[in-house]
Amino acid sequence: MAEKKIIKPKLMCAGATFSNMCDRFVKDGYKNDAWVPANLEEKLEAFAKIGNMYAVGYSWFLDQTPIDPIKYKDLLAQYGFRVGSACPANYIEAHWKYGTFAARNPQTRRDIIELSKRHIDWAKAADAVDIMFWMAHDGYNYPFQDHYETHWDYIAESLAEVAAYDPSVKITVEYKNYEPLTHQYAADLGKVMLLCDRVNKMTGHDNCKVIVDYGHALFGNENPAESVALANSYNMLGMIHLNDNMGRFDDDLIFGTVSFWQGLEFFWKLLQIGYINEDLNSKDGWFVMDNWPARMDGVEATTEFVRMVHHMVNLAASLPADKIRELQARDGNPPHIYKILREYVLKEI
């Protein structure tokens, strides 16, 4: 009998794992009694010891001079990593409190466009996987606060300028139902797919794609498996972020610890559509580990996150796809489908 192939999904390290993790309740952060890497090299060494992660992202602020992209790429390679997502820091400075791409102030929109272009130049030199945008402050809190069409036009026009700057660089856009504002413009899969489609038509290219964040989909009342299926069917699936939650808030828990069956279907669907690949040179098929272990040891939390993802991906791969698809096509009868799932997944007591 041939040895069973073990699938190794392409995981991008959880950048926040060793951060101070401050919030509005504990402004000094939760990690004052825990080990925190003193520098980037220590962080890379910790990630390398955990294993089964293959990329590390990078981000910088508006007025910050970034590390040389070639030096960063070479440093990561010494620890077995490539450069992952480049993420403009467009949400953790007060400069952006009135918006970025949707801001009323044209200078603010120009600031985020120019910062994005700098990231694109950097990403091209570093051979980064993508440029990621979460438009945290593009939204509103009150009825009558905004003229919605105007702000959507601002977003599309600004993103189009960014995407057209170098079409060889993939631009990915993350959606979130709410927080920090009560209403985000990039709130759900449908809106962001429409936005990316509009941007791509404006530029004549197809490098603007959607990020499906599993946890955001959950508390946005989406089924993540359906979300990736729909995004893929329109050639819009650009990146995936992994975490878990209770369906009420963006808890960023360890993947698979809460929504087990939805997580299993999520990976099963990704296998069905061919998203998962193990080619580290390819910029498609990546997963960002988006975990927030404020009250846990960062190494332990990351280790278990990686193990859960690997276990669930390979468990999903072991399911009898032909039998499940046959039942889905016949009548989608849940007892019949879950009989198969129970037999393959749950041990008899």
Image (cartoon, helix red, strand yellow):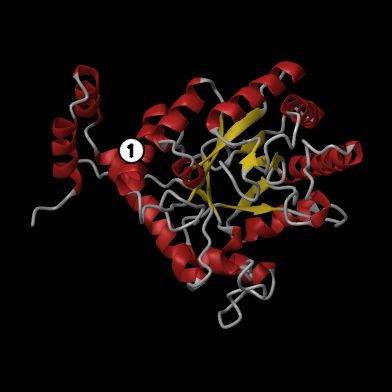
Give the amino acid type for the residue marked by disc 1 in the picture.
Glu
Which quadrant does the C terminus fall into? bottom left
**In the rendered image, the vertical position of residue 115 relative to residue 95, given as above or below:** above
- Residue 40 appears left or right of 47: right
Farthest-out residue, bottom: 33
Q: Which one is nearer the viewer's eye here, 26 or 271?
A: 26
Residue 206, image quadrant: top right
Per the image, the residue denoted by label 1 is 265
- Badge 1 marks a residue whose secondary structure is helix
Q: Residues within 10 Å of mark 1 (few under 14, many from 20)?
A: some
**Residue 274 makes an appearance in the image:** no
* Figure label count: 1
Farthest-out residue, right: 107
Farthest-out residue, left: 349
**Residue 320 makes an appearance in the image:** yes
**In the rendered image, the vertical position of residue 270 relative to residue 41, given as above or below:** above
Q: Which one is nearer the viewer's eye here, 217 or 316?
A: 217
Q: Position of residue 140 (x, y in %)?
A: 70, 41
Residue 48, image quadrant: bottom right
Q: Which one is nearer the viewer's eye here, 83 or 325?
A: 325
Q: Position of residue 76 (x, y in %)?
A: 65, 57
Q: Position of residue 296 (x, y in %)?
A: 48, 72
Q: Position of residue 86 (x, y in %)?
A: 70, 47
- Residue 262 appears left or right of 10: left
Identity of the residue drawn at 61% across and 49% down: 179
